């Protein structure tokens, strides 16, 4: 999934937003939600020191929870899920912070009560975002980029509430540009794909789309619109199996086994050799891998083999050869 950029929480008058000391907060969580010690510890780890103010009204967490539960018709388990996802909400004033933000979001997207509840349950962190500073500009940018109608924008948010947490400039815009170029999508086609499958916006450009397109190209696979779904939605194993059927280099079973043996990058599961040298590992390096080889490469200076790559050959020699291609 995509990285998110922290949003600015709504702000009241100075000193009015905050939580009681950790002991009091833990007591509240145990009493209200029967939280375990582990759940309390995880919640407290999400609180920043400047969110704790001993002078805060001890009744605030309870009042905030009651108001939020009533506003969204949340069950007790649903309310607990929201609070544990974003514990700082306990220190917010419902009237000054939460209610105006919910009203603005509901009005902007013409959400029904159940739809607003769905968005909050899908992304509890939205309760801490500033509508004016974060949500409104992101929605406007996405709508403008794809020329979405109001119903289409609403559909995207309902299918992918986490889109409200993505930075448009850092995440959404580069991903859309890459999809449009790499998969040869016209603007209308890009809009149709995103509206039909909003989770396409939730996959990372750098750990999924780009590495998989690079690997497919290295294997002689023509990257087209038909590859978008496999590149986005398939697991690593499924994608490699799909590539096996499509690859144009005529790899033997042994060579393919060797390729699959190369340690996969944790970010997306693509062999590091293809990240670095998408044209050639098959001709120079791939055949040098033994299916049973577990020799560890200790050459950390080579730009070819990262330290964790099991490498049964001389990295320096191969790196020089690769650079000369």
Image (tube, rainbow, N blue to C red):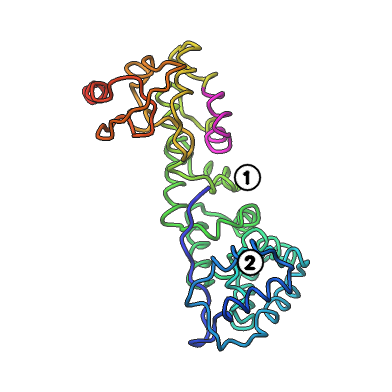
Identify the residue under disc 2: 40
In primary-sequence order, the first of circles 1 and 2 is 2
- Confirm or deny contact between disc 1 and disc 2 (CB under 8 A): no
- What predominant SS class does the magenta segment belong to? helix
Q: Is residue 214 above or below residue 89?
A: above
Numbered disc in front, either 1 or 2: 2
Task: Judge from the rendering whether residue 235 lies leftward or rightward of residue 113; answer left or right.
Answer: left
Q: Is residue 69 above or below residue 202?
A: below
Q: Is residue 240 magenta?
A: yes
At horizontal 53% and vertical 79% (from top left) the residue drawn is: 52
Q: Position of residue 234 (x, y in %)?
A: 58, 34
Identify the residue under disc 1: 196
Q: Which residues are magenta?
A: 228-243
Q: Is residue 183 above or below residue 253?
A: below
Secondary element type, mark 2: helix
Other residues around mark 1 within 10 Å, as few (<14) / some (14–19) / many (≥20): some
Q: Is residue 141 magenta?
A: no
At horizontal 62% and vertical 63% (from top left) the residue drawn is: 85
At horizontal 44% and vertical 29% (from top left) the residue drawn is: 263
- Kindly report the distance in space between the C-alpha atoms of the residues bearing marks 1 and 2: 39 Å
């Amino acid at each position: 999934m995509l990285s998110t950029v922290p949003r600015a929480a709504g702000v009241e008058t100075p000193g009015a937003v905050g939580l009681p000391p950790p002991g009091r907060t833990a007591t509240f969580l145990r009493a209200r939600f029967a939280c375990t010690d582990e759940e309390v510890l995880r919640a407290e780890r999400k609180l920043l020191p400047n969110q704790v103010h001993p002078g805060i009204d001890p009744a605030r967490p309870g009042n905030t929870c009651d108001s939020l539960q009533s506003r969204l018709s949340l069950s007790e388990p649903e309310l607990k899920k929201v609070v544990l996802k974003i514990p700082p909400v306990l220190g917010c004033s419902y009237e000054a912070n939460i209610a105006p933000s919910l009203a603005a979001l509901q009005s902007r997207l013409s959400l029904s009560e159940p739809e607003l509840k769905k968005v909050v349950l899908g992304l509890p962190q939205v309760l801490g975002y500033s509508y004016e500073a974060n949500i409104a500009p992101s929605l406007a940018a996405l709508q403008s980029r794809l020329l979405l109608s109001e119903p289409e924008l609403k559909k995207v948010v309902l299918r992918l509430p986490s889109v409200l947490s993505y930075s448009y400039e850092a995440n959404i815009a580069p991903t859309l540009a890459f999809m449009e170029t790499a998969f040869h999508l016209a603007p209308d086609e890009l809009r149709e794909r995103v509206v039909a499958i909003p989770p396409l916006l939730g996959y990372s450009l750098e750990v999924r789309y780009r590495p998989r397109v690079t690997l497919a190209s290295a294997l002689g696979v023509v990257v087209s619109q038909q590859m978008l779904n496999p590149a986005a939605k398939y697991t690593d194993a499924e994608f490699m199996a799909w590539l096996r059927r499509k690859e144009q280099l005529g790899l033997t079973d042994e060579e393919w086994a060797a390729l699959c043996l190369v340690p996969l990058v944790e970010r997306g599961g693509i062999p590091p050799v293809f990240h670095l040298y998408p044209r050639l590992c098959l001709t120079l390096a791939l055949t040098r891998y033994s299916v049973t080889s577990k020799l560890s490469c200790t050459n950390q200076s080579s730009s070819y083999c990262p330290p964790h790559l099991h490498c049964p050959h001389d990295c320096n020699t191969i790196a020089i050869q690769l650079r000369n291609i």
